[in-house]
Image (tube, rainbow, N blue to C red):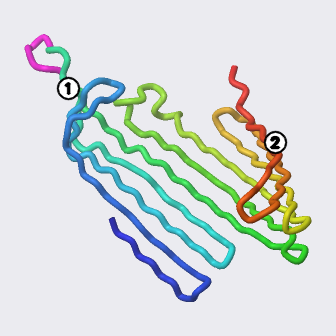
Amino acid sequence: MLVVDFRPSKDVEFILSGGLSNASNFELTGLGGAQAKNWLSYNTQLRFRMKKLFMQVFMNAQESGNTYLIPQSKSQTGQWNSQYLDDQSKQIVAQIQHSSDLLKNKLNLVYGFDFIATIPESFNTIYGRFDSSDNVNQYGGYLQGEYKFSPKFSVVAAVRADYHDRINEFMLSPRGALVYKPSENNTFRITYNRASLPHLS
């Protein structure tokens, strides 16, 4: 694991990190037992912060090396049949978030955007005929606001919108809460929340 932290000023920060592992062991998979040989898993992440702005992008990926399924049958020549797995899948994520204080700090807004790309790649050794058309992209945006009527009363409202390119549908998830805080150690809330699910057919 490697981490590089660079802070040119008190309000600005860059963090770069990454890791790598190499595995050679026996694994149970959805296709049966497999002998992992030099299976590489690696990740890298870049984070940036400037005052109330936060951004990050990271990737998780793997390379299967010389991994093969444990033979379950013999060929006509008497040799054990071994199926090698070639997995070079990866996932890439990008996120950005910012916040603002308005109306003399009575209103606090938090808003952001997420993106996730899932890229399976096995050269037909794992995902078969779907290998060339199984990439998935997901997009999400959100906005949350908290308004303080007084030190004891506040209202919170939020909405999140998501889009999944395989479903081809936008999904909205609203949320609201009325908060009463009579003392430092006591809080009462009335909340409403609805999570939207895709319409699968």
Disc 2 is placed on an element classified as strand
Q: Position of residue 100 (x, y in %)?
A: 78, 71
User: Which three-letter amino acid code belongs to the residue tagged 1?
Assistant: Ile
**Residue visible at 86% across and 60% down in the picture:** 154
- The residue to which callout 1 is attached is 70
**Tag count in the figure?**
2
Q: Quadrant of the C terminus?
A: top right
State left or right for residue 57 relative to residue 200.
Answer: left
Q: Position of residue 124 (x, y in %)?
A: 38, 30
**Within the image, what quadrant is residue 54 found in?**
bottom right
**Sequence-wise first label, 2 or 1:** 1
Q: Position of residue 92 (x, y in %)?
A: 51, 53
- The residue to which callout 2 is attached is 192
**Residue visible at 40% across and 57% down in the picture:** 43
Pick the residue in front: 108 or 148. 148
Q: Real-space Cα distance between discs 2 and 1? A: 52 Å
Position of residue 134 relative to residue 10, above or below, is above
Disc 1 is placed on an element classified as loop
User: Which three-letter amino acid code belongs to the residue tagged 2?
Assistant: Tyr
Q: Residue furthest bottom?
A: 9
Magenta span covers which residues? Answer: 75-82
**Residue visible at 69% across and 74% down in the picture:** 52
**Residue visible at 42% across and 29% down in the picture:** 127
Position of residue 19 relative to residue 137, above or below, is below
